[in-house]
Structure formats: structure tokens, C-alpha cells
Amino acid sequence: MANLLPPYIGQGEFYFLKMIAEEIEKGYKPGSTFKPESQLYVFTKFRAAFGPFYPDRFMKYKIKQLKKRYQDFSELLSQNGINWNKKKNVVYGNEKLLRENYKGRYAKAREKNFDLMCQVFESGVMFE
């Protein structure tokens, strides 16, 4: 979604994940589904911080997109010979493997919100 409105770009993703993580910490158990009330609370809180122009459809899509990015990055890091410098946010290691399996994608393999993604998507809570 290249036509994102400016307020979301930058810290918006961090705060969106943080709000979801905080809501999950309020008592969700692994295997449970993220409740519509929690979703409404997070979406409303996000809109209060970043503006009213983000519809539910956009935010639901964003959760799916973040989960896919989390899965892809986790898969990359699980490969033997691949390392991630968390502080510099750079993936390095077996160049041949990176080139063959990940083509040009590995050059952009940076995930500054990966810790929050782990917190949200490894919680066992499912999203509709």
C-alpha cells in the first residue's frame, strides 16, 4: 500500500503492534481469538493517535501483512548460517544461500519491529 497517508509511516507500525501486544497481555490465552471488542479498542486508540482516516479494513489488512512479514523474517533467520545483528538491524551470513533462496529480498531484510511482532504473533492468539 504505497499510498499510505503520512502519519502512519514511521512510528505508526510500532505503536499499532504495541497496542495489540498490550491488549493481548490483558489475559489472552494461547489458542484464543483476538476479540472484536479488543480489535475495536486498538483501532479506536490508533485512530486517536494517528488520525481518523484509517478504516477497519486497512487495519485488518495491516495485521495480516505484519504476520506475513513476521513469518518470512522468522523463516529467514531459521536458516543455518544466517544471522541478524539486532542493533544494526542487518541480516548477514551465508551469501550464497541468501542469493539463491532469497534473491534480492535479503538485501532489504530488516525488521525493526521484529521483537514486537514476536510478542504478538508468538502469543498463540489468532486474528480473523
Image (spheres, rainbow, N blue to C red):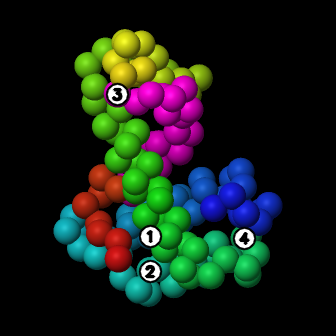
Nearest-to-viewer mark from 4 and 3: 3
> In the picture shown, does residue 90 fall above or below 41?
above
Name the residue carrying label 3: 101
Q: Secondary structure at mark 2?
A: helix
Name the residue carrying label 1: 23
Q: How far is the residue under mark 3 from the one under mark 1?
A: 36 Å
Residue at (31% x, 37% y) in the render: 75
Q: Main secondary structure of the magenta part?
A: helix
Name the residue carrying label 2: 38
Left or right: where 126 falls relative to 25: left
Percent across and percent down for residue 87 are 56, 24
Q: How far is the residue under mark 4 from the one under mark 1?
A: 16 Å
Q: How far is the residue under mark 4 from the one under mark 3?
A: 39 Å
Q: How far is the residue under mark 1 from the one under mark 2?
A: 7 Å
Q: Amino acid at mark 1?
A: Glu
Along the line of sight, which residue is nearer the eye, 98 or 9? Answer: 98
Name the residue carrying label 4: 49
* Pointer 3 or 1: first along the chain: 1
Q: Amino acid at mark 2?
A: Ser
What residue span does the magenta drawing correspond to?
A: 101-120
